[in-house]
Image: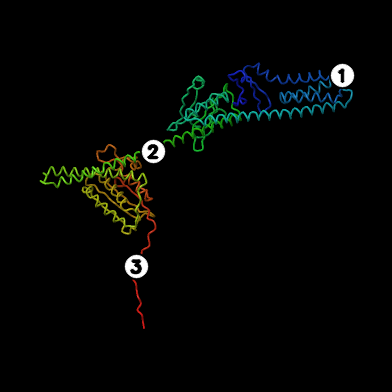
Amino acid sequence: MNYTQCRQKPLKNPEASAMISTFPGGTTAKHPSSSFSAVWGKCYGYLSAMMAIAVTALVATPLRTYFDLANIVMLFLLAVMVTAVKFGRGPAVLASFAGVVAFDFFFVQPRFSFSVADAQYLVTFAVMLAVGLVTAYLAAGLRHQASLATQREARFRALYEFARELSGALQVDQVCEWTRKAVQQTFHAQALLLVPDEDGKLRFPSFPNLENLDLQRLSGFDMEPAQWTFHQALQSGAGTDIHPNNAYSYFPLVAPMRARGVLAVCLDDGHVILDDQNDQLKAFAAVAAIALERLHYVEVAQEALIRVESERLRNSLLSALSHDLRTPLTSLVGLSESLAMSRPYLSDMQTEMAGALRDEALKMCRSVDNLLDMARIQTGNVVLNSQWQSFEEVVGSTLRACRASLVNHQVRTQIDPDLPLVRFDAMLIERVLGNLVENAAKYTPPGSGITVSARAQGAFLEVQVLDNGPGLPLGTEETVFEKFVRGNPESALPGVGLGLSICKAIVEAHKGSIKATASAGGGACFTFLLPLGTQPAPQVEEDEFHEPNLP
């Protein structure tokens, strides 16, 4: 059941077109299809009231010889009450006055005259009129309350049906189309539901049934107040102080998280939206907003599930591929070394080629190790072997391991001499520092400088690796830590873009953080923090002292 009582418009079927609506004033109005029907709708109740009094007088005339005048008065009051229940307050008031006049003219002596022989009848007339007016007021009030209850029931039923229908929507266009149809059927109005695109601009949804739209009215649609309503989450358009001359009323679709779109409504024949209709349209907009937000989070959940499954599949593939490549690459490194030491000795060119083959195989081994480490970290199979140790030793071992990559660079260390012991996994942190140093050496020209510094910064150990190379491209400070992302994708330098991702995963496993910024002197600066924690208490071994036995 639709809330057809709120609008005085004919429906498409003949039965619905005959429906009428009662408004809070107690008046009944039919759809103004013509001026004659409108006038007739207003006059019909008053004519019926006069007819009721006339019929009561005709029925009571033969009964006056059997009934007292007090009982005949009751018959007129009964006619007043029936008129009030059936036609409302105005016709009932008219029936009260007409009943007093008819009772005086036809039943009070002298009959067929408005003169009164006994002055006591004046009191009867007054009481009869007062009782008739009170009866008319009470009956009309009950009729009005019944009409309001019917309207509320119809309103709640329409809202319930609308919410139940939207609960099965699976696409945004379905919500838009079903909302448009529900508003059109309930309020007999042109409706549009607009949703924003990725840039926050409202767009028109697709209309599978364009024949149901008023294209002429749609062509005059103004997007400016709709966009204002979406950004401000406030109603605008007809009936408001914002863009009041607009033909449409714009209702924001405010969901619990944020606005999801705008519902634009234009009543037929330029009618003004009533307060009850305005409240119900807000309820329709709220239901549509919740449906759109539900679809949004369903889509987010699906995308998250796809990302998780893709990540799991990629990690499994990387792990399998790394295991399959490690053995032949190790064999290739061993064979190249054996080739260089084989007898008879190779020529200088052949020795150089064997060394180049070994170096390239080692680079490939490191790339495979990165793939395997990333797969192992992502699956959570890494267990930290954290120990309290000096970070200066890690810096020294890292630089020794990377000496082949740093042969053409000037490396400087700045380690705070008062640096306390730090609890971390030395092998993994050495891997982090080594990746950062090798990246600095890879992406800076020969002869450039690299600085490794470490100091205590509050509750954290701050480690920085600075270079004076070309630096990171603007806007890539965050993305360089993603998997398979490189600072310069077009670079001819080898690498798959996993080194920094591994660094971030290892540092975050230590409850720390890492970031990339532009160096003050040019180049790139990578900084990672490790929590210092509570220093362990020193263990002092006491020498055993035996007091001699004195006599």
* Residue at the disc numbered 1: 111
Could you say whether the residue bearing mark 1 is in a helix, strand or loop?
Answer: loop
Residue 223 image point, x, y percent: 48, 27
Secondary structure beneath dot 3 equals loop
Q: Is residue 40 above or below residue 377?
A: above
Q: Nearer the viewer, residue 538 or 518?
A: 538
**Quick one: quadrant of the C terminus?**
bottom left
Residue 466 locus on image (x, y percent): 29, 48
Instruction: Identify the residue position indicated by label 3 in the image.
Output: 541
Which one is in front in this view, the residue at disc 3 or the one at disc 1? 3
Q: Distance between the residues labelled 3 and 2?
A: 55 Å
Does residue 400 appear in the picture of this structure? Answer: yes
Q: Which of 428 and 266 is in front in this view?
A: 428
Q: Position of residue 448 (x, y in %)?
A: 24, 47
The image's mark for residue 309 is 2
Against 32, residue 299 (above or below) is below
